[in-house]
Image (spheres, rainbow, N blue to C red):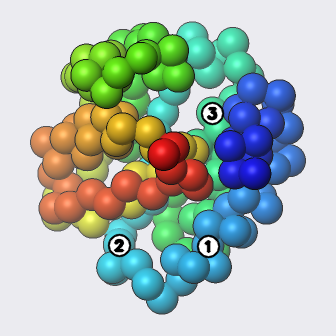
Amino acid sequence: MAREAVHALKYARLTSLARPLAELMAAPLRGSLPAADALVAVPLHRGRERERGYNQAELLARHLAPQLGLPLEPWMRRSRPTPQQARAATAAQRRENVRGAFAADGVRPGARVLALDDVCTTGATLDDCARALKEAGASWVLGLTFAREL
């Protein structure tokens, strides 16, 4: 069911799903997360966001941030286009696709950051986001996703 919900949000343009999915995420997170300073959505490249019309991770983050009492910060950007991760066959290909694909700006020194994406398969995207955020000054980064591909 989670897979269908993510696919509907991501590919079928059912953006109205972002709020209920964020609510489903928020309930178990409240009170169980380490103290964080900000929530950051994993960015799409400008071209892919223009093509899709929105960034599904950002939609989730917009609804999740107030529920967790965190500011949603625009610290991340995708510095280059990458192939769609869903089309990569192996974990190694996924890591290579996103290696160095993210950059961060304006991070408060020492900030504790939650990085939000819709789904995690190998962790390659979140790993590269964490690298960029830490290089920009974050003290730690915790990745959050609505779903995990098994």
- Image position of 15 with respect to 12: above or below: below
Please, what secondary structure does the residue beneath circle 2 have?
Answer: loop
Q: Nearer the viewer, mark 1 or mark 2?
A: 1
Q: Provide residue 79's location: percent of width, then percent of height.
A: 34, 19
The residue located at (59%, 15%) in the rendering is 48
Looking at the picture, which amino acid does disc 3 mark? Asn
- Left or right: residue 13 compared with residue 115: right
The answer to which quarter of the image holds residue 14 is top right
| Camera sees residue 45 | no
The residue located at (61%, 73%) in the rendering is 26
The answer to which quarter of the image holds residue 113 is bottom left
- Left or right: residue 34 compared with residue 83: left
Q: Provide residue 57's location: percent of width, then percent of height.
A: 58, 43
Answer with mark 3 or mark 1, whichever residue precedes in sequence. Answer: 1
The residue located at (32%, 60%) in the rendering is 142
Packing grade of label 2 (10 A; few <14, some 14-19, many >=20) is: some
Q: Nearer the viewer, mark 3 or mark 1?
A: 1
Report how many numbered discs are placed on residues in the image: 3
Answer with mark 1 or mark 2, whichever residue precedes in sequence. Answer: 1
| Camera sees residue 96 | yes
- Give the residue at mark 1: 26
Looking at the picture, which amino acid does disc 1 mark? Ala
Please, what secondary structure does the residue beneath circle 1 have?
Answer: helix
| In the foreground, 9 or 67 | 9
- Image position of 88 with respect to 57: above or below: above
- Give the residue at mark 2: 36
- Give the residue at mark 3: 55
Packing grade of label 3 (10 A; few <14, some 14-19, many >=20) is: many
Looking at the picture, which amino acid does disc 2 mark? Ala
Work out how far the residue at label 2 is from the one at label 3, CA to CA, in angstroms. 23 Å
